[in-house]
């Protein structure tokens, strides 16, 4: 469906309304539990970055995405999928752990890297979100249940991943490197749609490296096919006056150039998806693999990424089952990022651990459908602005803890984008429309309520209208109950939180080194004095040619040959890795 006959702003409104209407179709059922034993399904995640539902399968046919369309034709589309934050690191924390970032110190963007900036805002340096001792990375849980787990290649979890997390991590990580017959959980991160790729048009991550897909031993990353010249301007066969442009962006040539680049990046991302789908088919694995395609939060443009409007947290998701069940359907299910871990466990026949704060939406341990999804915003780069959000199928509630702070936060990174520069130029010239000027208001109400069906861009605050008081109270209460259930570390300053994590010390704690001993049966026992430490080990030289470290789950019952060495390291999520232990 095309909206070329509509004015630009109406095109976006019509698209949003179409998505809502499609999302309101009756939800289907998934009452076929995952098989147990050797028939456990493979799980493939294809994760794009910084992207709202701007693809044909979700109603926007500005460009064609043939590979995502073929995946949608045999899968189910979930238009009501929501990130827990409008930015990547907190979102990826929730994906990796199944826990809300506000519960464990993963809510500030970002906790690692750029140490100097962290110190400038009063922090002792980089730190790791500190989960409860029982929490593990979901990929480790998959490994503990016999899966070969790979990540190619972005992490950004708000903590350093333990060696127990992945069998393979990096540009070579691929299901093709698993032992024969072992089920896999493989993640591929496609960075071409990232915010930075709107302006860094001669940098890497532009297209897949030609020919790599036929070589099972080479790097599986995505290479730059324009190494010696600037990337060509995007060729989008849509006239300027027909290009979908949300009303909160400035209607200028430079802005339209950014929007064209966004769509061109989607085109390239779709080609990358095609490479992975073709690889899966070539390996004869399509009929044994559940495929998820989704994005890590909303779009890259101004008033999208980082915000808790739907433009920042609503994402497209397609799930395709091996038997093509419910092929081509649209499902209205509310799906939160904290649901990924329990849902994947359920599909693999693994009972979700009690510490998870989401729920299984498919598979053997499927829960009842959720009524609400929740999200949070705290520090973005050097600026603090605490906001909590709740949403049902129609209404969005925002709670602003700093109403005396304006909506717009000046971020040097975002201001590299031409469309952001255009908004600032027109603001300074007093030439913004009323809608465009909303983002630059210098105060916020304590509460906001939006009807996302009739106001998809969330421009009309309904919180003060008498006829919406019941809905306001409902979502306010739901937010209170959510915060009471999961906890909210936004109640304390970030510096106070970090020093509490570190026991009052000035540096991140180090995990206790594993101790090696034998029990009465002669089995090897590995222990760390640090509660929650995950232990990884290798046996050399036997493991020297194998990827990754083994996950220690209990006594190791085998004999070491003469000259073999058992090496082990330990790490609690949020701590530094221990030193190396070795013996025997």
Image: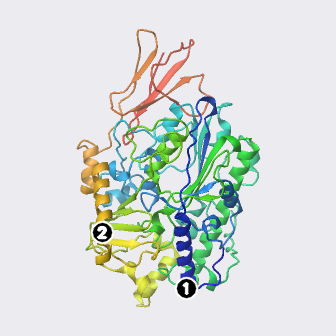
Going 41% across and 66% down the picture, which residue do you hit? 308
Residue 355 in the image: x percent, y percent?
A: 37, 40
Residue 277 in the image: x percent, y percent?
A: 70, 51
Instruction: Please say if 176 is above or below 278.
Output: above
* For marks 1 and 2 on the same chain, the one whose residue lies earlier in the sequence: 1
Q: Which residue is mark 1?
A: 252
Disc 2 secondary structure class: helix
Instruction: Please say if 97 is above or below 389.
Output: above
Badge number at residue 271: none
Instruction: Please say if 400 is above or below 481.
Output: below
Going 56% across and 31% down the picture, which residue do you hit? 146
Badge number at residue 470: 2
| The one of 368 and 281 positioned closer to us in this rendering | 368
Residue 69 in the image: x percent, y percent?
A: 68, 61
Q: Is residue 286 left or right of residue 554?
A: right
Extreme residue in the front direction: 26
| The one of 4 and 278 positioned closer to us in this rendering | 4
Label 2 crowd bin: few (<14), some (14–19), many (20+), radius 10 Å: few
| The one of 474 and 398 positioned closer to us in this rendering | 474
Going 50% across and 21% down the picture, which residue do you hit? 566
């Amino acid at each position: 469906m095309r909206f070329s006959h509509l004015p630009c702003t109406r095109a976006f409104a019509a698209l949003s309304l179409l998505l809502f209407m499609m999302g309101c179709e009756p939800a289907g059922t998934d009452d076929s539990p995952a098989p147990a034993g050797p028939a456990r399904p493979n799980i493939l995640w294809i994760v794009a970055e910084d992207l709202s539902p701007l693809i044909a399968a979700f109603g926007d046919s500005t460009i064609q995405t043939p590979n995502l369309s073929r995946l949608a034709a045999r899968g189910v589309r979930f238009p009501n999928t929501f990130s827990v934050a409008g930015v990547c690191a907190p979102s990826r924390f929730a994906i990796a752990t199944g826990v809300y970032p506000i519960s464990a110190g993963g809510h500030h963007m970002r906790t690692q890297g750029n140490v100097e900036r962290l110190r400038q805002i009063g922090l002792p340096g980089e730190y790791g979100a500190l989960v409860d001792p029982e929490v593990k990375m979901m990929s480790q849980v998959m490994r503990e249940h016999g899966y070969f787990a790979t990540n190619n290649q972005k992490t950004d979890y708000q903590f350093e991943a333990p060696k127990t997390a992945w069998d393979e991590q990096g540009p070579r990580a691929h299901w093709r490197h698993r032992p024969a017959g072992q089920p896999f959980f493989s993640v591929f991160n496609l960075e071409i749609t990232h915010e930075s790729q709107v302006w860094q048009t001669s940098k890497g991550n532009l297209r897949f490296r030609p020919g790599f897909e036929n070589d099972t031993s080479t790097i599986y990353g995505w290479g730059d096919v324009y190494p010696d010249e600037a990337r060509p301007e995007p060729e989008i066969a849509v006239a300027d006056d027909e290009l979908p442009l949300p009303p909160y962006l400035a209607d200028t040539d430079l802005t339209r150039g950014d929007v064209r680049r966004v769509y061109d990046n989607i085109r390239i991302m779709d080609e990358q998806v095609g490479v992975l789908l073709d690889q899966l088919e070539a390996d004869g694995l399509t009929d044994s693999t559940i495929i998820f395609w989704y994005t890590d939060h909303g779009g890259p443009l101004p008033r999208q990424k980082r915000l808790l409007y739907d433009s920042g947290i609503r994402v497209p998701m397609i799930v395709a089952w091996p038997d093509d069940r419910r092929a081509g359907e649209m499902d209205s299910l509310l799906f939160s990022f904290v649901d990924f871990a329990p849902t994947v466990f359920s599909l693999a026949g693994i009972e979700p651990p009690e510490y998870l704060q989401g729920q299984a939406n498919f598979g053997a341990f499927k829960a009842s459908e959720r009524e609400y999804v929740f999200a949070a915003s705290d520090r973005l780069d050097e600026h603090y602005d605490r906001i909590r959000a709740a949403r049902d199928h129609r209404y969005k509630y925002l709670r602003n803890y700093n109403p005396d702070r304006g909506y717009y936060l000046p971020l040097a990174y975002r201001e590299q984008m031409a469309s952001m520069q255009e908004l600032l130029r027109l603001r300074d010239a007093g030439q913004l429309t009323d809608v465009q000027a909303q983002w630059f208001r210098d105060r916020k109400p304590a509460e906001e309520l939006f009807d996302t069906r009739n106001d998809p861009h969330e421009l009309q605050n309904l919180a003060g209208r008498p006829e919406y008081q019941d809905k306001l109270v409902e979502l306010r209460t739901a937010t209170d109950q959510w915060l009471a259930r999961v906890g909210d570390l936004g109640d304390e300053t970030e510096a106070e939180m970090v020093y509490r994590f570190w026991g009052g010390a000035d540096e991140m704690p180090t995990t206790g080194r594993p101790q090696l001993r034998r029990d009465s049966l002669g089995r090897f026992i590995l222990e760390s004095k640090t509660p929650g430490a995950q232990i990884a080990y290798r046996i050399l030289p036997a493991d020297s040619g194998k990827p990754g470290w083994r996950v220690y789950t209990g006594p190791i019952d085998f004999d070491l040959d003469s000259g073999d060495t058992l090496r082990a390291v330990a790490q609690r999520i949020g701590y530094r890795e221990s030193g190396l232990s070795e013996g025997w």
